[in-house]
Image (cartoon, helix red, strand yellow):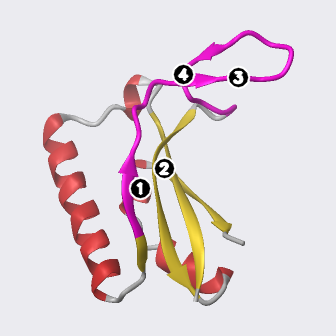
């Protein structure tokens, strides 16, 4: 098994990207269930790390930019490391991630 980094991205910049408190509670329960499922299958190598949706992006030659956003207005909101045999297995795990329920994305990177 190899370690794969999963970066969770979501829109925290627009009003439509802000879930209500009720939706947030349901959403967090889904995350907990998903992570418990991964841990139960011994696929969770490192627990989720939630990140502050604020932040800074620093680019060479440019001033610091408020907000941890890319060109798509998505911020990295969390990350975890899973164990998988290859990219296809990591993709299979990531496809069940609750981030998709709110229009987010998952970036997958294989560790060395």
Graded by Cα atoms within 10 Å as few (under 14), some (14 to 19) or many (20 or more), the crowding at tag 4 reads: some
Image location of residue 98, percent across then percent down = 36, 61
Q: Which residue is mark 1?
A: 99
Image location of residue 14, percent across then percent down = 45, 24
- First of labels 1, 2 by sequence position: 1
Image location of residue 100, percent across then percent down = 44, 58
Discs 4/3, front = 3
Quadrant in which the N terminus appears: bottom right
Q: Residue furthest right?
A: 61
In space, the residues marked 1 and 4 are separated at their CA atoms by: 19 Å
Q: Are the residues tagged 2 and 3 within 8 Å (C-beta)?
A: no
Q: Which residue is mark 2?
A: 104
- First of labels 4, 3 by sequence position: 3
Q: Residue at x 37, y 58 (%)?
A: 48
In space, the residues marked 4 and 3 are separated at their CA atoms by: 10 Å
Tell me the SS state at disc 1.
helix
Residue 67's label in the rendered image is: 4
Residue 58's label in the rendered image is: 3
Discs 3/1, front = 3
Discs 2/3, front = 3
- First of labels 3, 1 by sequence position: 3
Q: Residue furthest front?
A: 112
Which residues are the magenta region?
46-71
Tell me the SS state at disc 3.
loop
């Amino acid at each position: 098994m190899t370690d794969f980094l999963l970066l969770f991205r979501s829109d925290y910049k627009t009003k439509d990207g802000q879930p209500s408190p009720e939706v947030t509670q349901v959403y967090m329960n889904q995350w907990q269930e998903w992570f418990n499922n991964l841990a139960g299958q011994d696929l969770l190598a490192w627990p989720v790390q939630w990140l502050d949706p604020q932040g800074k992006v620093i680019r060479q030659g440019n001033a610091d930019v408020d907000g941890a956003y890319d060109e798509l207005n998505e911020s990295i909101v969390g990350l975890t490391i899973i164990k998988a045999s290859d990219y296809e297995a990591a993709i299979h795990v990531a496809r069940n991630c609750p981030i998709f329920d709110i229009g987010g994305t998952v970036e997958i990177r294989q560790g060395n």
